Amino acid sequence: MPGTAPNDHENATFGSRFRISPRWWKTVLVLAVVIVVLGAAMRGFVVQRFTIPSESMQPTLQVGDEISVWRPDALRGEIQRGDVVVFDGRGSFVDAALPTPLQKLGSWVGLGSRDVYYVKRVIGLGGDTVRCCDPEGRLLLNGQPLAEDYAPLPASAIEFSVQVPEGTMWVMGDNRNDSADSRALLGRAGGGFISTDRVVGPVIGHGSSLD
């Protein structure tokens, strides 16, 4: 009849249509786990974030800048001269044992100490000769002057001439008067050369508020 309320059986049937089943919750949980795992994989194997702690890369990078590092290039060994890279300083700038495989895995997902990472510019790679400086104060790479509009002249207050061994790189900060880089390791074991397998990746983006 018009105006008559539905009976109890009708109410039970109507409610059951909108009841969330346990299977649905399991699906949501599985999707959440997959999203977390994919996020960790993206962070560890594709893009990793770091924050600039010092003035050594000014004016290119400022203190507090967030940088994004592209890991695939390092994994493929595709590091180029002129790249600004992040690398693990253990065994060179940091007087500590090289990381274990477990520590490496942890670093890929943001675990472990962040104080062991450095950001510098790659000046020379294996087989290159790097020398400071020509009469105009420019670095010489394989005898040719480097045009570095990001760095002051002279390019270094420390004179040096090095030949970069295979599998290594010579790195310098853009703020040449306030950067602890390969020059600081001259005369020490390793001679200032950083193994390229220590590279996390080249910097692909930076800013004070990267999202």
Image: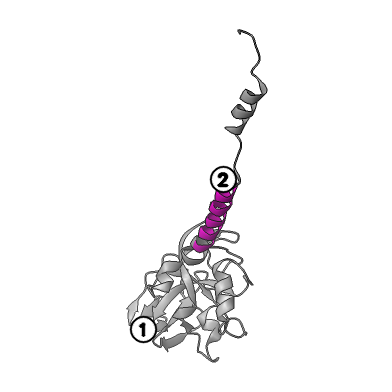
Earlier-in-chain disc, 1 versus 2? 2
Residue ID at (47%, 77%) = 171
Please state the extent of the stretch shown in magenta in the rendering: 23-41
> Can residue 101 be seen?
yes
Q: Nearer the viewer, residue 119 or 38?
A: 38
In the depicted structure, whether residue 63 falls above or below residue 142: above
Looking at the picture, how far across and down is residue 178, in whole percent?
Answer: 57, 72
Q: Secondary structure at mark 2?
A: helix
Q: Position of residue 70 (x, y in %)?
A: 45, 64
Please identify the quarter of the rendering in which residue 33 is found. Answer: bottom right
Magenta stretch: dominant secondary structure = helix
Q: State the image quarter where residue 134 is shown.
A: bottom left
Q: Report the quarter where the N terminus lies.
A: top right
Mark 1 and mark 2 residues within 8 Å of each other at the beta carbon: no
Asked whether 33 falls inside the magenta stretch, the response is: yes
Between disc 1 and disc 2, the foreground one is 2
Residue 60 seen in the figure: no
The residue tagged 1 is 128
Mark 2 residue type: Trp
Residue type of the residue flagged with mark 1: Asp
The disc label shown at residue 136, or none: none
Across and down, in percent, residue 82 comes to 40, 70
Residue 51 drawn in magenta? no
Residue 158 versus residue 208: which sits nearer the camera?
A: 208
In front of the other: 82 or 106: 106
* Residue tagged 2: 24
Marks 1 and 2, Cα distance to the nearest angstrom?
Answer: 60 Å
Going 54% across and 60% down the picture, which residue do you hit? 37
Q: Secondary structure at mark 1?
A: loop
**Within-10-Å neighbours for mark 2: few <14, some 14–19, many 20+:** few
Q: Residues within 10 Å of mark 1 (few under 14, many from 20)?
A: some
Residue found 51% across the figure and 74% down from its top: 87
